[in-house]
């Protein structure tokens, strides 16, 4: 087994094709194809399903990719360690957040401190945040709960109650407070399955003897906001994420308090990375301040 063969396989898997892998590695497509073919022949295993339109991983390929993700991430960490100043000057930081709102003040300071670092911020729910971290598709996550276990490095950002909200002309919005039973009589606009906000709402409503059935299920917080603003029904969000929108009014839920604990997390095994550590240090200093 040769390093160049594993590198070729990894890049084909990550980039979704031989030509894209060749571009990423500044090699020719035949060279990449030859390296992967030799790896498959040497160990008598098929790593990719090949057809004219796309290349997909076989089961063996998926298992190998899990290993090479860690292998090449460890290699990157070693490079970062040996060239710390370069990593902090021009590295890349990938963040996936259930709500970017919680990061704005941290991002502002980080960008000022490390202006040349390239940052990407993707949206997701609790489930997709942890999946992205485990698959090494993201370096840092923000999610609405404190994860259990020791696999994550965790920094709590804040803790705020879940509220309902509606358009200004909604009769329920004008009262400012509603019970679960009152809320259930209106069309409910809720996040997709996997949303921690939705899970907590449905659990508490059930404990209060009310069944919450969404009339509309929307993927992402912004989609819920726009549907509610157009008069589509009642939405739900943590108070910290409600923000300022003249089209909407908050509604306090008359029930036992439901708190959302927003946390900054990363895989503990990657917490030593220079950019990850720098971001956590800034977040920690802001929280302390």
Image: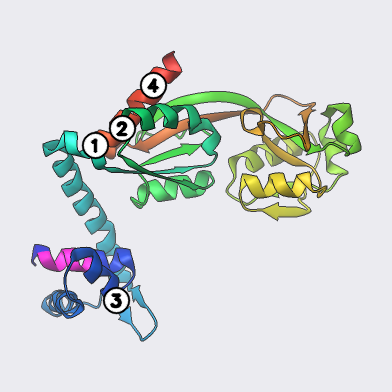
Q: CA distance from mark 2 to mark 4?
A: 16 Å
* Sequence-first disc among 2 and 3: 3
Element type at mark 4:
helix
Task: Give whichever of 249, 26 is nearer the camera.
Answer: 26
Task: Give whichever of 19, 77 is nearer the camera.
Answer: 19
Q: Residue furthest top?
A: 289
Identify the disc placed on residue 153. none
Q: Which residue is mark 3?
A: 48
Query: Where does residue 161 sit, x and y in percent of width and height?
Result: 66, 26
* Sequence-first disc among 2 and 4: 2
Front of the two marks 1 and 4? 1
Based on the picture, tell me whether residue 163 belongs to the magenta stretch. no
Identify the disc placed on residue 284. 4
Q: Which residues are magenta?
A: 4-9
Element type at mark 2:
loop
Q: Residue furthest bottom?
A: 52
Q: CA distance from mark 1 to mark 2?
A: 6 Å
* Sequence-first disc among 3 and 4: 3
Identify the disc placed on residue 114. 2
Based on the picture, tell me whether residue 8 belongs to the magenta stretch. yes
Q: CA distance from mark 3 to mark 4?
A: 44 Å
- Labels 1 & 2 near each other (Cβ < 8 A): yes
């Amino acid at each position: 087994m040769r390093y160049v063969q594993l590198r070729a396989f990894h890049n084909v898997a990550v980039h979704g094709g031989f030509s894209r892998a060749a571009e990423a590695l500044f090699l020719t497509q035949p060279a990449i194809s030859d390296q992967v073919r030799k790896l498959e022949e040497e160990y008598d295993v098929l790593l990719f399903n090949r057809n004219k339109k796309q290349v997909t991983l076989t089961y063996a390929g998926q298992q190998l990719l899990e290993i090479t993700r860690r292998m090449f991430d460890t290699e990157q960490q070693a490079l970062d360690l040996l060239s710390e100043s370069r990593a902090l000057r021009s590295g890349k930081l990938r963040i996936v957040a259930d709500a970017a709102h919680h990061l704005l003040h941290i991002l502002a300071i980080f960008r000022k401190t490390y202006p040349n670092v390239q940052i990407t911020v993707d949206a997701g729910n609790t489930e997709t945040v942890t999946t992205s971290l485990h698959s090494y598709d993201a370096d840092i996550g923000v999610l609405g709960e404190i994860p259990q276990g020791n696999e994550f490095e965790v920094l709590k950002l804040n803790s705020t109650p879940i509220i309902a909200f509606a358009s200004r002309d909604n009769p329920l919005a004008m009262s400012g407070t509603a019970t679960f039973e009152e809320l259930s009589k209106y069309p409910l606009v809720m996040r997709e399955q996997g949303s921690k906000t939705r899970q907590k709402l449905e659990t508490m409503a059930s404990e209060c003897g009310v069944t919450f059935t969404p009339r509309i299920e929307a993927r992402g917080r912004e989609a819920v906001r726009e549907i509610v603003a157009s008069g589509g029904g009642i939405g739900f969000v943590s108070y910290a994420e409600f923000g300022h929108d003249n089209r909407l009014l908050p509604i306090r839920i008359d029930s036992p308090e439901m708190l959302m604990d927003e946390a900054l997390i990363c895989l503990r095994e990657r917490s030593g990375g220079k950019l990850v550590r720098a971001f956590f240090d800034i977040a920690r200093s802001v929280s302390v301040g």
